[in-house]
Amino acid sequence: MEAVGLAGGEKAAVSKVYKPKVFASLVTEVVKPGKCVGCGACVAACPPGVVRFKEVAGRDEEPILAGKCLLCEFCYYQCPQTGAPDERELEALIFGRNSSEKEPFGIFMKAYSVRAAREEILKVASDGGAVTAILAYALSEGILQAAAVTGVRKDAPWKPEPKLALTVEDLIEAAGTKYSVAPVALAISEAVDCYNFDRLGFVGTPCQVRAVRKMQYGAHGAIKYGSRVKLIIGLFCSENFYYDRLIKEFVASKIDPSKVTKFSIRAGRFTAEAAGEKVIEVKIKEVKPYARSNCEFCTDFAANLADISVGNVDSPEGWSTVIVRTEAGLKFFEGALEKGWIEAKPLEIKPDGVLVKLASKKREQAKTG
Ligand SMILES: Cc1cc2nc3c(=O)[nH]c(=O)nc-3n(C[C@H](O)[C@H](O)[C@H](O)COP(=O)(O)OP(=O)(O)OC[C@H]3O[C@@H](n4cnc5c(N)ncnc54)[C@H](O)[C@@H]3O)c2cc1C
Ligand code: SF4
Ligand code: SF4
Ligand code: SF4
């Protein structure tokens, strides 16, 4: 900024004028460098509602400014990619300390292999249905009023969309892993702005979990939304993919995606099933070219900031690995167990196990800058 007609000291003072971190800062620091995770926190939190998603060919949706910005900085400070607070600061705020080198997948209380006790959940779940069963327990007991989850669009096979699950049936409809992104933070704003709910569950990848933790713990957090979320379930995550590339290009070149009933990544292989048969089975490196650019920067495999983290590594096929991290998470887990929604076996965490290896590798290999 040119400070016309001012003396030297005054010029210096003017040049230090605070530059607000507004939507343009998000574009410069996050969207343009390919770090946007598509979580929707900026869209959800913008008070005048002027941040929208726009489809960008080959890169799915990205946020754009579609109206007059009030310079309030809310979008910037909910974004999981801007720091302030960053992962380490959030961890200290949530757990009262930071994880050490000996805790590569974060701070936790207990670990289990878990399976839903109900067949209707197991049939549609990605692994053991732990995520759906724990939330189903909480909804059916009235402990939570709704859960922000990821469903699929009716007009585009396997295209994820944010979904506010109000019933166990809604949860079952949203079970199973989709290997691309929905702006799931929008389901939180729907729950608060449309229903005025104040007891919500949330399910998301580690980056999406970080957005919600920023709403809860950030000095500029969208507390109106964050404070309503009482249970955060994070999914283990090596990487995610662009829908346009993985589904519309790669999968569609082999089978009509609407025929696929399940996708999974397990033991280093990406598979798709249709009518009970494996129709695609390739090594992960074959689908790497379709991965999202933001995932190269990611250090969090096991959703270290969640109340409960869930994945499949180190558990037998058909079971979920469940890492209980917080007192809140423990309450939900024990309630689901007590009410017969899940069965659980204690899981021994081995230093040479897959969870430890993948979490350590992700920390070491993430791109910086
Ligand atoms: C992109 C991605 C990559 C993953 N990579 C790994 C991995 O490398 N290793 C590993 O052990 N586990 C990984 N997982 C987790 C694994 O696929 C299962 O989600 C997890 O084991 C829970 O299984 P479940 O049967 O308990 O869940 P279910 O009961 O089937 O419930 C799954 C829940 O996940 C939500 N969900 C589905 N897709 C998405 C999505 N794209 N984004 C946000 N939420 C979603 C649904 O809304 C549902 O609530 C990954 C998940 C995702 C989304
Ligand atoms: S009004 Fe606030 S939240 Fe919306 S774009 Fe501007 S700075 Fe971001
Ligand atoms: S808040 Fe989420 S959607 Fe918005 S810029 Fe950041 S990562 Fe992208
Ligand atoms: S790898 Fe990291 S950035 Fe990519 S989807 Fe998973 S948690 Fe988000």
Image (cartoon, helix red, strand yellow):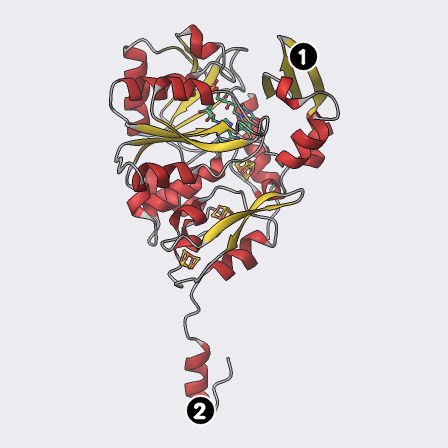
Circle number at residue 206: none
Q: Mark 1 or mark 2: which is in front?
A: 1
Tell me which residue sits at (61%, 49%) in the image: 34
* Gap between marks 1 and 2 measured at Cα: 73 Å
**Front position in the image: 165 or 230:** 165
Residue denoted by label 1: 278
**Left or right, 330 with reference to 269:** left
Q: Taking the image as drawn, is residue 104 in sight?
A: no
Residue denoted by label 2: 6
Tell me which residue sits at (49%, 33%) in the image: 161
Q: Taking the image as drawn, is residue 335 in sight?
A: yes
- Amino acid type, residue under disc 2 in the picture: Leu
Residue 93: where, in percent of width, then height? Answer: 33, 44
- Amino acid type, residue under disc 1 in the picture: Lys
Q: Earlier in the sequence, mark 1 or mark 2?
A: 2
Residue 12: where, in percent of width, then height? Answer: 45, 82
Question: SS at mark 2?
Answer: loop
| Number of residues whose C-alpha sits closer than 10 Å to that of mark 1, classed few (under 14), some (14–19) or many (20 or more) | few
**Left or right, 281 with reference to 307:** right
Tell me which residue sits at (37%, 61%) in the image: 72
Tell me which residue sits at (37%, 55%) in the image: 48
- Residue 298, compared with residue 314, is above or below; it is below
Residue 21: where, in percent of width, then height? Answer: 44, 62
Q: Is mark 1 within 8 Å of ligand 1?
A: no
**Front position in the image: 230 or 249:** 249
